[in-house]
Image (spheres, rainbow, N blue to C red):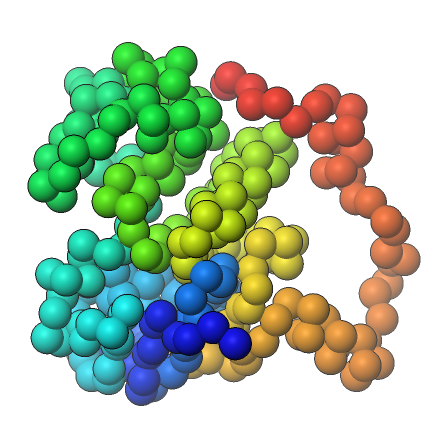
Amino acid sequence: MSKAIITVENLIKKYDSFTAVNNISFEVFEGEIFGLLGPNGAGKTTTLEIMETLRDKTSGKVIIHDFDLDKSPDAIKHIIGVQLQAAGYYPNLNLSELIELFSGLYGISVQPMELLAKVALTDKAKARYKELSGGQKQRFSIATTLINQPKIIFLDEPTTGLDPQARRNLWDLILEIRNAGTTIVLTTHYMDEAEVLCDRVAFIDAGKIIGIDTPDKFIDNLVASGFERKKQVKQANLEDVFINLTGKEWRED
């Protein structure tokens, strides 16, 4: 088994009398895609932001690639990539200029066109972020996580609001990034997405982890308990039909 690249021990985050993250512990192994799943308000994003050094914890321990969050937050920032939301981009800069800006903040030099090629956006190099379609915006946000060649990237609901083509193609991109050696931690509300992408998932509810395992193991255990779907499962779903009929190429909005 791969070694742990992230270790979280007894993590707690409180806001006055409200406990958003309630004494959770887990590990993420090097080279895996690890999913944090749960309903809104469960503590997923708070946990993610603590690991990203964006939010202070109340107590507990977080180790990322042998760096202690309490002692070496700056070192952690140099080895992780964080998916930015739309508000993180200057509206009057084009994609190449944004990449140059962010690489300058890291103190490194990158070739914007090489990075844009990884996410199939070379034809949009001179376009402003606000001019992109939803799928293009998500691909660019993932491109920015790769600027510093991180060991780990964090993706918070990366496919929300995308059409089926964009969603499936973004899955392929995420898998390509993992296959190139990058560990990925993501949140999603789409269980089919977690089932396809994640090597392991942790379910969080009311700030507590209520289960960690592989998607297949969770499903097998549920079936073994006597659970039966009301509708027979077929070998394809309606999204598969959509992709088959309309194709999988990237589309413009």
What residue lies at 14% left-to-right and 62% top-to-bottom?
75
Query: Closer to the camera, 142 or 113?
Result: 113
Q: Residue at x 11, y 35 (%)?
A: 104
User: Observer-nearest residue: 21 or 106?
Assistant: 106
Question: Please, is residue 7 above or below residue 152 in the view?
Answer: below
Residue at the spot x=28%, y=69% of the render?
A: 65
- Using residue 63 as the reference point, say whether residue 56 is left or right of it: left
- Indicate the position of residue 81 as horizontal and vertical percent values: 29, 50
- Number of numbered markers: 0
When asked about the image quadrant of residue 244, the answer is top right
Residue 145 versus residue 69 in the image, above or below: above
Left or right of 219 in this view: 229: right
Q: Is residue 230 visible?
A: yes
Figure quadrant of residue 113 = top left
Image-based side of 218 in relation to 43, left or right? right
Tell me where residue 87 appears, x and y as whole percent: 23, 36
- At 14% from the left and 39% from the top, the residue drawn is 108
Pinpoint residue 160: horizontal percent, then vertical percent: 49, 42
- Work out whether 26 lies above or below 167: below
Asked whether the viewer can see residue 91, the reply is no
- Say which quarter of the image contains residue 17: bottom left
In this rendering, the answer to whether 16 lies above or below 30 is below
